[in-house]
Amino acid sequence: MALLSASYVTLPADWARAEPVGLGPFVTRESFRAPDGFVVSWSSRAHRKQAGRFDAGRGSTWWAPSAMGWWVGVLFAIGSICFTVGPFPRFVDLVGTDADAVVFFVGSIFFTSAAFLQYVQTVNAPHALTAGAGERFRFWTWEPGRIDWSGSLVQLVGTVFFNVTTLAALDTSLNSTQAHRLVWVPDALGSVCFLVASGLAWFEVSHGWWSWHPRSLSWRITALNLAGSIAFGLSAIASKVVTTTGEPRSIMLVNLGTAVGGLCFLVGAILLLPERTEARRSA
């Protein structure tokens, strides 16, 4: 296992690093000491979400359309609502199967939009201690040594897989072989991506494999997202078509896993809004 070295943050001259904490090669928390002895505690998630050029000091908790983090939470929440209500049989009866399939596809588009903004937010996290004055805007970086970069990229890829599977599901003329290839496979791959991304976010907040900090907004958000990803994964497993019957293994588990996962993501997305301004309120 690679040894912890240092975070991606660059320090002013004569500053020193101390006590890097994380998992594997990923540094998620670190202390910086100024020449006069003043110590700054840094953590990856808070730095990305509260110190970036698109979020620092922008707007209030519940209304901040000029802040990227606000849009990430709102777009994830809208997509989550689609995946929460879509599986309910009464909703399907109300709108019809075709409209219900459209709801899932629209929800996946909102997921991808939020995941893209989250990735842009991540690659533009300042490499300085403060809000990145003078740093150029980035659409893309290659920083696999950052746990947040890896997690946001994997999640973005996962949302694209959900775009593919929900778009293919609009075609009701697919046979079982086509449905397996175009609907189930990308659904399963998207679920794996979400599970990996949620796990990395959990490790980032936990600064290791495990933690218990239920009073922390960040901890609750990552715990909810991890639970939601597990529920989506169970739904994907249950949706695999049995060749002898041509039906999913358990349509009840498919709907339950999707609805529970969507609900977990919805609550987590709403909590992103107060998390964004948490440090400012404390100050």
Image (spheres, rainbow, N blue to C red):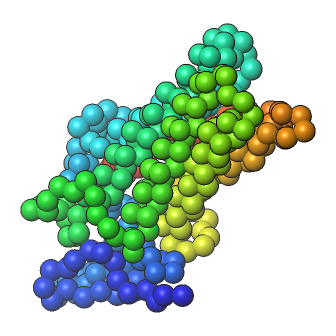
Q: Residue at x 61, y 55 (%)?
A: 192
Q: Which residue reaches farthest right? A: 244
Q: Quadrant of the N terminus?
A: bottom right
Indicate the quadrant where residue 133 lies.
bottom left
Question: Left or right: 193 with respect to 37?
Answer: right
From where the camera sits, is residue 29 visible?
no
From where the camera sits, is residue 230 visible?
yes
Q: Position of residue 225 (x, y in %)?
A: 57, 50
Q: Position of residue 185 (x, y in %)?
A: 65, 46
Q: Residue at x 53, y 68 (%)?
A: 203
Residue 37, compared with residue 49, is above or below; it is below
Q: Residue at x 79, y 39 (%)?
A: 241
Comparing 240 with 24, the one in front is: 240
Q: How many marks?
A: 0
Q: Quadrant of the C terminus?
A: bottom left
Residue 146, compared with residue 81, is above or below; it is below
Question: Left or right: 223 with respect to 144?
Answer: right
Q: Position of residue 28 (x, y in %)?
A: 42, 73
Indicate the quadrant where residue 135 lies.
bottom left
Residue 96, compared with residue 13, is above or below; it is above
Q: Residue at x 28, y 36 (%)?
A: 64
Q: Which residue reaches farthest left? A: 134
Q: Position of residue 273 (x, y in %)?
A: 40, 42
